[in-house]
Amino acid sequence: MATEIDGVDWRSVCPISSALDVLGDKWSLLIIRDLLIHGPRTYSDFLASPEHIATNILASRLKLLTSLKLIERANPQATARNNAFQLTESGTALRPVLEGLARWAQSHLKDQHRSMASIS
Amino acid sequence: MATEIDGVDWRSVCPISSALDVLGDKWSLLIIRDLLIHGPRTYSDFLASPEHIATNILASRLKLLTSLKLIERANPQATARNNAFQLTESGTALRPVLEGLARWAQSHLKDQHRSMASIS
DNA sequence: CCGCATCCGTTACGATACTG
DNA sequence: CAGTATCGTAACGGATGCGG
């Protein structure tokens, strides 16, 4: 078992490995993507994205990303209802990574995924 | 069920989502990392990395990444024994993404992961 | 030996139903 | 609307076996 803090266990001291310990799944970076593109977003906004995340997965990811301070409530002291999530500075700093991923996919995934869009 | 080709099912036409359909797990990008840092690498080289991937996971990831043409055998017509894997052009093109992840982790994961190394 | 494949227990995911 | 509970399925992780 590796060192576990805040619900994530760090496999090694490598920064890339550590980044993947947090973001290395199919959903976390999509949540960040939605926030980067649309700005503050509510629970049901996320559910309306075309990839159709399940409600329990969404809730657990939002909780984890919040505890890691990549996202936060737009209105901290209000109730959950209509209280959107927004990026912190740490979350916003992922923009270049997502842009790089998008550019890579467009250049190198065309053959495998013909119907991929030209721009996100 | 989404469209499935080559063992990956594409959740949407978004390039970011498509990139994560391929690379959105805890191991694929670590394999790419090892190849970017060390050059051609054998099966047991990967096993020796500090994150300790399981043998079955490694085999299945190498197979998938090969089928997607992100990696390839250094010596295509030789047997598997001591026949390293290396990056294709598509795989090499992920370098900026991994560099971005590394820089992000160093800037924004210090608090959560104190023992993280300074440079990968 | 090295490169896997197979088995099996455990964990994560995914869909849906349900609650405050 | 914003989650939680439940339950079936898929992925992971470790151990082991086996062919070249």
Image (tube, coloured by chain):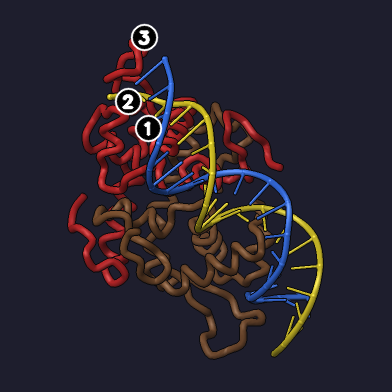
Chain colours: A red, B brown, C blue, D yellow
Name the secondary structure under disc 1.
helix
Q: What is the crowding at mark 2: few (fewer than 14 residues within 10 Å), some, or many (at least 20)?
A: many
Left or right of A98, for residue B52: right
Q: Position of residue B106 (x, y in %)?
A: 50, 37
Q: In the image, what residue type sits under mark 2? A: Phe
Label 2: chain letter: A
Residue A85: image tag: 2
Does A61 sit above or below residue B21?
above
Does A69 sit above or below residue B60?
above
Q: Position of residue B69 (x, y in %)?
A: 41, 73
Label 1: chain letter: A
Query: Gap between marks 1 and 3, in whole Å?
Result: 21 Å
Between B76 and B23, the residue placed more toward the observer is B23
Name the secondary structure under disc 2.
strand
Left or right of B52, for residue A109: left
Q: What is the crowding at mark 3: few (fewer than 14 residues within 10 Å), some, or many (at least 20)?
A: few
Residue labelled with disc 3? A77
* First along the sequence among labels 1 and 3: 3
